[in-house]
């Protein structure tokens, strides 16, 4: 029964306030898109998802174009999101990837590894990020990639991809967003004298609670993501 709960539990950030704004969390066996401007918090949100899911008993694999194994573990520790124990216990697998070298093999190289992760019992796979791939392959290959990932979710694995907003034109973004079960959009806005990070919950299919449309947050050392009341953010 404990093993089965890993498949039916919600994908959580480990932050109750943030999860509540996201409708309780993202349902399992889902395909999610985390899209946003540069420095808007995409990687930190992905890292919160890693940490929260590991706490809930998930096995997680992350494909990162942003970090090495050491830098990811160190970065998350600085946010009080320690993952070293889970990494050493093989509950977390980290795949540093060179997008420039592998852009042409996105479908033939990345998909089989993700499929293997699913066969090995990993419940959540995160790709942070697919920006370089999305800007260096054709639209047909990109759509095929998302179709293949969507098909993999039927095998008991949830998949999340982060991407910079500029990687897609509006038409492509609409098509890919429609294929995904969850679409989280991040941006930065000037509020008063401060630069605030904003999370828009564009869609979470099957959310257990009402989703909050827009969440204002900050990223703090030794804390991670901290939700800020809208009124306070404007001050």
Image: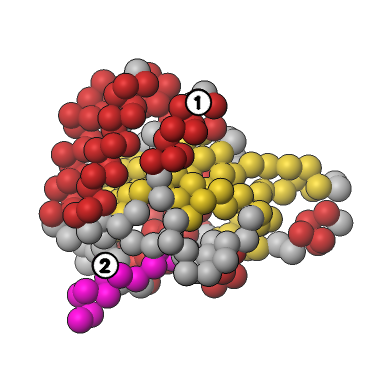
Tell me which label, 2 or 1, sits earlier in the chain.
2
Q: CA distance from mark 2 to mark 1?
A: 33 Å
Q: Which residue is more in the foreground, 28 or 53?
A: 28
Residue identifier under label 2: 7
Mark 2 residue crowding within 10 angstroms, few (<14) / some (14–19) / many (20+): many
Q: Which residue is more in the foreground, 133 or 210?
A: 210
Residue sitting at x 33%, y 61%? 28
Quadrant of the rendering where the N terminus is positioned: bottom left
Indicate whether 172 appears above or below 14.
Answer: above
The answer to whether any part of residue 83 appears in the image is no
Residue sitting at x 72%, y 49%? 196
Indicate whether 228 appears above or below 70.
Answer: below
In magenta segment, residue 60: no
Mark 1 residue crowding within 10 angstroms, few (<14) / some (14–19) / many (20+): few
Left or right of 38 on screen, residue 147: left
Residue sitting at x 54%, y 61%? 22
Q: Helix, strand or loop at disc 2?
A: helix
The image's mark for residue 224 is none
- Magenta span covers which residues? 1-13
Q: Which quadrant of the figure has residue 21?
A: bottom right
Q: Position of residue 35 (x, y in %)?
A: 51, 40
Residue identifier under label 1: 171
């Amino acid at each position: 029964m404990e093993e089965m709960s890993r498949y039916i539990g919600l994908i959580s950030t480990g932050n109750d306030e943030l999860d509540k704004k996201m409708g309780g969390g993202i349902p399992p066996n889902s395909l999610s898109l985390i899209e946003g401007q540069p420095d808007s918090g995409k990687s930190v949100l992905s890292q919160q998802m890693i940490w929260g899911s590991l706490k809930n008993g998930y096995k997680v694999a992350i494909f990162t174009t942003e970090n090495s194994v050491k830098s990811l573990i160190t970065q998350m520790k600085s946010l009080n999101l320690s993952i070293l124990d889970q990494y050493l216990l093989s509950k977390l697998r980290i795949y540093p990837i060179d997008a420039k070298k592998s852009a042409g093999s996105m479908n033939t190289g990345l998909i089989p590894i993700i499929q293997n992760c699913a066969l090995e019992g990993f419940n959540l796979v995160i790709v942070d990020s697919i920006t370089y791939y999305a800007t260096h392959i054709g639209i047909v290959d990109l759509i095929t990639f998302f179709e293949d990932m969507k098909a993999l979710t039927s095998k008991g694995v949830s998949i999340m991809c982060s991407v910079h907003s500029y990687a897609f034109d509006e038409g492509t973004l609409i098509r890919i967003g429609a294929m995904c079960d969850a679409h989280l959009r991040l941006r930065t806005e000037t509020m008063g004298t401060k630069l605030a990070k904003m999370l828009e919950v564009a869609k979470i299919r099957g959310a257990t609670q009402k989703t909050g449309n827009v969440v204002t947050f900050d990223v703090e050392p030794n804390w991670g993501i901290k939700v800020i009341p809208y009124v306070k953010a404007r001050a």
